[in-house]
Image (tube, rainbow, N blue to C red):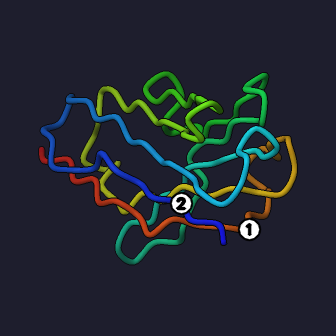
């Protein structure tokens, strides 16, 4: 059974940084692309970032380009999201997810397994 567990969320002031982690069990992550999503109250879930299985390619939604960095350590079955220069509009529950292919699809991919989410709150 695949399990994804996120950590690293919290409350931070505008301009601050957080690093999210997502550790997977029940699968070998080096076979799968992995992504980070977020959902703010009253808004649809959006794909924030994706990283291919071998970390050769990444995707970022326009609103986080230059501020967020996705990375992965397949030896640890873990994917990270470094979030810098945080803004109040980044406030959301952040989820990691994995998909049963090796590549990212530019924000249009389907994902198969999801974590429970971690809250990120950015105060102004």
For the residue labelled by badge 2, is the local secondary structure a helix, a strand or a loop?
A: strand
Q: Residue at x 55, y 31 (%)?
A: 70
Q: Residues within 10 Å of mark 2 (few under 14, many from 20)?
A: many
| Left or right of 16, for residue 55 | right
Q: Residue at x 49, y 22 (%)?
A: 66
The one nearer the camera, 41 or 71, is 71
Image quadrant of residue 118?
A: bottom left
Task: State the count of labels.
Answer: 2
Q: Position of residue 14 (x, y in %)?
A: 18, 36
- The residue that disc 1 covers is 112
For the residue labelled by badge 1, is the local secondary structure a helix, a strand or a loop?
A: loop
Q: Residue at x 55, y 39 (%)?
A: 79
Disc 2 versus disc 1: distance between alpha carbons? 11 Å
- The residue that disc 2 covers is 4
Q: Position of residue 104 (x, y in %)?
A: 80, 43
| Left or right of 113, for residue 116 | left
Mark sitting on residue 90: none
Q: Residues within 10 Å of mark 1 (few under 14, many from 20)?
A: few
Q: Which badge, 2 or 1, is on the more N-terminal residue?
A: 2
**Is 45 above or below relative to 29?**
below
Q: Residue at x 77, y 35 (%)?
A: 52
Q: Quadrant of the C terminus?
A: top left
**Is 74 above or below relative to 5?**
above
């Amino acid at each position: 059974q695949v399990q994804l567990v996120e950590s690293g969320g919290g409350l931070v002031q505008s301009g601050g940084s957080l690093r999210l982690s997502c550790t997977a069990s029940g699968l070998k992550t080096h076979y799968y692309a992995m992504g980070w999503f977020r959902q703010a109250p009253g808004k649809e879930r959006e794909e924030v970032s994706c990283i291919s299985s071998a970390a050769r390619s990444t995707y970022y939604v326009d609103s986080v380009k230059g501020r967020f960095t996705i990375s992965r350590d397949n030896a640890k079955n873990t994917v990270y999201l470094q979030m810098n220069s945080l803004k109040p509009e980044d406030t959301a529950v952040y989820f990691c997810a994995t998909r049963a292919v090796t590549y990212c699809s530019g924000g249009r991919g389907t994902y198969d397994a999801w974590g429970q989410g971690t809250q990120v709150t950015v105060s102004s």
